[in-house]
Image (cartoon, grey):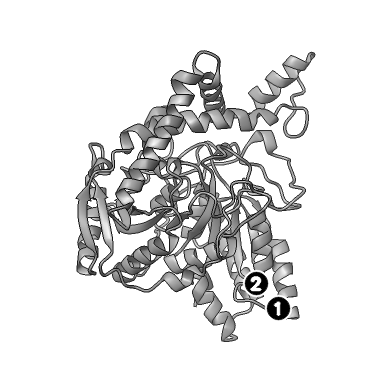
Amino acid sequence: MDITELTVHELIEKKKAGKLTSEEIVKAYTKRIEEKEKDIDAFITITTDEALKTAKEKDKEGLKGDLDGIPIGIKDNINVKGTKTTCASKMLENFVSPYDATVTEKLNEAGLISLGKMNMDEFAMGSSTENSAMKVTHNPWNLNTVPGGSSGGSAAAVAANEVPWALGSDTGGSIREPAAFCGIVGLKPTYGLVSRYGLVAFASSLDQIGPLTKDVEDAALLLNVIAGHDEKDSTSYNREKVDYTKALKNDVKGLKIGVPKEFYAEGLNEEVKKALENAIEEYKKLGAIIEDCSVDVAKYSLATYYIIACAEASSNLGRFDGIRYGYRTKNYETLNELFKNSRSEGFGPEVKRRIILGTYVLSSGYYDAYYKKAQQVRTFVSQEFEKAFSKYDVLLTPVSPNVAFEINSKVSDPLEMYLADVCTVPVNIGSVPAISLPCGVTSKGMPIGMQLIGPRFSEETLLNAAYTFEQKIKFRENHKPEFKK
């Protein structure tokens, strides 16, 4: 039995039956990291020594809850007390967090053990994890391709069985796109369902923490842990606690699914389109009601997203000035030179690009023309989603127009990279939830992702719709990463 092949719910069953200890589980993942990390480069900080020590202590004391003693990976923009939180940036390369994020506290309360902090695009700005100042993460399905971004380290580690599951963050598709590229499940919860306290902010009105897992049941399990109201986050929503695993009923009879034509426009890869058409046919066989529809948000969302996200990034990253904490240049004589050189040397090209764009759209004379207009369009996008969800339970779309692309193939063309987000950014603008799950592979064996979008706080519906499809096609049983070069 290869322990690292098991899902978390399978690990729980083995643990309950007395067939596995926490130490055995952590040891298996430690060995797997030693074997595969040189090819994948998914981690920024590895904490397996501490994890093994904790696992032994837990076994000795006696495991308490279902998740007690289960390991996890955490994206490196989520604070873990006493561990580096670098955001994959030179600006924070030596920053050790003095406190835990709320989600980290929840993981600790459940008894989960961190295996380390995962690589990402710097400050979560990117779609390929090539913008990390630390390293480039490789996709385990083909080591010459990107794992997606910005949560590429988390997704690649789950796909490569280096961690059983992981936390990521999603500002414009940063959980769902890497999940699609790496053939796993990624859930972007409703804005406000999961606390953002302790998440290093990129765009505060768009950021959301969520799970990256091997299957849908694990996504429901991890959402159970991290969801809930937090008084330390003013945007956190106070609602009754839900057990999301109870939503997994393997039945979609009568479920109304809309297929918005705008998400299937020119530029969609033919093999991606074919896989989605096959998925639609599977849902019909399962008893779902499928209708073509119009949700006219895709063409407006990309520009709106990059104006709002960059404006908020410009404000949020103003704190990194070389004075309070983070990187400080040695090359300065005046205070202005300290600010300028610290930020010039500490930030990478993509972060600088977005700060400049954000500062521009917020500047006098351009605020009304760009930022104010983008906020008006944001309201329009939310209204369009509301109209769609008055007719349909969920919407079925691509996650990305293409599958994982080769490393360095798009670095010189940021606009082309931004266009990869066209199917995911409307979800963040509308503050609605969405889940990405694999629905097939290309002729070259690369995974294809499908996105299901629902109205606010419809995670139970989304998880069940995804679970039912997953049980039918059994993707994990039929397809595995090949680590080919």
The image shows residue 322, relative to residue 214, as above or below, that is: above
Residue type marked 1: Asp
Residue for badge 2: 69
In what element is the residue under mark 1?
A: helix
SS class, disc 2: loop
* Residue at (67% x, 52% y) in the render: 231
Q: Which residue is mark 1?
A: 59
Q: Amino acid at mark 2?
A: Gly
Furthest toward the right, the residue is: 333
Q: Is residue 2 visible?
A: no
Q: Position of residue 270 (x, y in %)?
A: 21, 45
Residue at the image position 77 percent from the left and 23 percent from the top: 330
Gap between marks 2 and 1, in whole Å?
Answer: 8 Å
- Residue 186, given in percent of the width and then of the height, sits at 45, 56
What numbered label is drawn on residue 423?
Answer: none
Q: Residue furthest bottom?
A: 17
Q: Is residue 128 above or below residue 471?
A: above
x 25%, y 59%: residue:
279
